[in-house]
Image (spheres, rainbow, N blue to C red):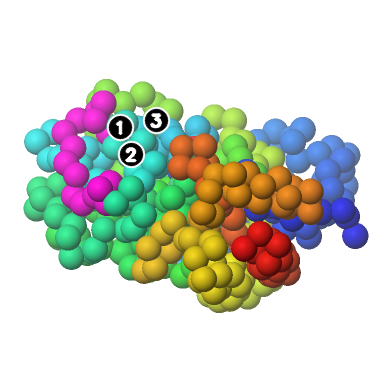
């Protein structure tokens, strides 16, 4: 058994040990080809098989209908902040954004460079410690789309339900930090995007799931590489794809399947995060959760202690005990435990016990 850290990194993040071991077995010689998958042509039958199978697995596990394209792109979710408005924002039809935190703000910033935008709802006045009430979200009838960040990785908030949108207004979601962590009704969405490096594999590949009717071939001024139709027409093989990352996503999806699929993972994630949220809630105020109760994330658990001194001590001692990645994002401070799909239940239990022990010693 490999010596594995108690990895609570926010992304890139823990991958399943089984996936790493399988990749290791195939690393030098992929299916007796005499070379690694990284050394093969992306036009080879072997890589095409990986590409097609990865797409098929994603469709099956996430329930993606034929009326959607599944694309494997590069440039991270950050490039999608631009590609979404470049491809979907139409003149005279504002793009509406729900402002939930750091990542929603970055998405809006890019859309503003492309066209007209409007804020549909915001929790900025509460320091983004909650998802705005769905009933408070105002979407213009003529909006090009409504954009949400389904899980705010830095603040640790997550939409429990998704907003309804007027007819003909597609719902667009940045699911970078919660894709495939719970069951979703894909039909509610016009477009979903996510970097792979939290729940699905290593960095390097970005997943885009987009309704076919939203992919237009009549965009005159959008560069070829930044158009969805380019990649849709070529099965994401327009240019050299991030082949090793796609292969790692393939192995991770097979691992998800072996665990019983997305519904089983959803329950698993709920059970393991409850251990940590309980350590916060039962601490009598020693730990204070950052996110308001109904908005808590099952992927990023953010919490504070009474003083920054104590937070520093917590971070330091946790590192000495083998925990990695518990310091909060530099923009909000405090502490954060990221508990993506591949973070084992037993590591969450060990963290909850460490929190209780730390409280006993410092409370
Ligand atoms: N959106 C969210 C919700 C994220 O968590 C991140 C990365 N932490 C991004 C977008 C940016 O992703 P990338 O680094 O792949 O561009």
* 202 lies above or below 159: above
Is 346 left or right of 263, judged from the image as shown? right
Label disc, if present, on residue 109 of the rendered structure: 1
Based on the displayed image, in which of its 4 quarters is residue 354 positioned? bottom right
Q: Nearer the viewer, residue 362 or 77?
A: 362
Q: Residues at badges 2 and 1 in contact (C-beta under 8 Å)?
A: yes
Q: Nearer the viewer, residue 154 or 203?
A: 154
Visible residue check, residue 237: yes
Instruction: Residue under label 3, please give it.
Output: 226
Residue 119 lies, in percent from the top left, at 19, 44
Is 205 left or right of 131, judged from the image as shown? right
Q: Quadrant of the C terminus?
A: bottom right
Instruction: Residue under label 2, please give it.
Output: 105
The residue lying at 54 percent from left, 54 percent from top is 305
Question: Magenta span covers which residues?
Answer: 111-125
Q: Nearer the viewer, mark 3 or mark 2?
A: 2
Is 270 left or right of 170, judged from the image as shown? right
N-term mark: 3 or 2: 2
User: Pointer 3: residues within 10 angstroms few (<14), some, or many (20+)?
Assistant: some
For the residues labelled 3 and 1, the Cα–Cα distance comes to 18 Å
Based on the displayed image, in which of its 4 quarters is residue 283 positioned? bottom right
Q: How many marks?
A: 3
């Amino acid at each position: 058994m490999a010596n594995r850290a108690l990895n609570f990194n926010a992304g890139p993040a823990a991958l399943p040990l089984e996936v790493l071991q399988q990749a290791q077995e195939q690393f030098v010689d992929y299916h007796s080809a005499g070379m690694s998958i990284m050394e093969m042509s992306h036009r080879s039958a072997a890589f095409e098989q990986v590409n097609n199978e990865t797409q098929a697995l994603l469709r099956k596990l996430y329930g993606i209908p034929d009326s959607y394209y599944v694309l494997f792109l590069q440039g991270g979710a950050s490039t999608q902040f631009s590609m979404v408005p470049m491809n979907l924002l139409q003149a005279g039809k504002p793009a509406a954004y729900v402002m939930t935190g750091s990542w929603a703000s970055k998405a809006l910033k890019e859309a503003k460079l492309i066209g007209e935008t409007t804020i549909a709802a915001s929790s900025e006045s509460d320091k983004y410690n909650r998802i705005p009430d769905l009933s408070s979200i105002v979407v213009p009838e003529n909006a090009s789309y409504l954009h949400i960040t389904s899980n705010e990785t830095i603040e640790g908030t997550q939409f429990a339900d998704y907003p309804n949108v007027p007819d003909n207004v597609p719902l667009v979601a940045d699911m970078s930090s919660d894709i495939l962590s719970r069951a979703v009704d894909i039909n509610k969405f016009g477009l979903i995007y996510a970097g792979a490096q939290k729940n699905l594999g290593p960095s390097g590949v970005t997943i885009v799931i987009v309704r076919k009717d939203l992919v237009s071939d009549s965009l005159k001024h959008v560069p070829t590489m930044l158009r969805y139709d380019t990649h849709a027409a070529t099965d994401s093989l327009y240019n050299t794809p991030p082949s090793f990352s796609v292969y790692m996503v393939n192995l991770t999806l097979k691992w998800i399947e072996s665990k019983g699929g997305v519904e089983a993972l959803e329950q698993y994630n709920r059970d393991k995060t409850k251990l940590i949220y309980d350590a916060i809630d039962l601490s009598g105020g020693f730990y204070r959760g950052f996110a308001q109760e109904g908005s808590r994330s099952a992927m990023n658990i953010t919490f504070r202690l009474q003083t920054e001194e104590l937070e520093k001590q917590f971070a330091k001692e946790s590192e000495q005990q083998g925990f990695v990645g518990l310091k909060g994002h530099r923009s909000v401070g405090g502490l954060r435990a990221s508990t993506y799909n591949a973070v084992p239940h037993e590591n969450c239990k060990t963290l909850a016990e460490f929190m209780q022990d730390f409280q006993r010693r410092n409370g």
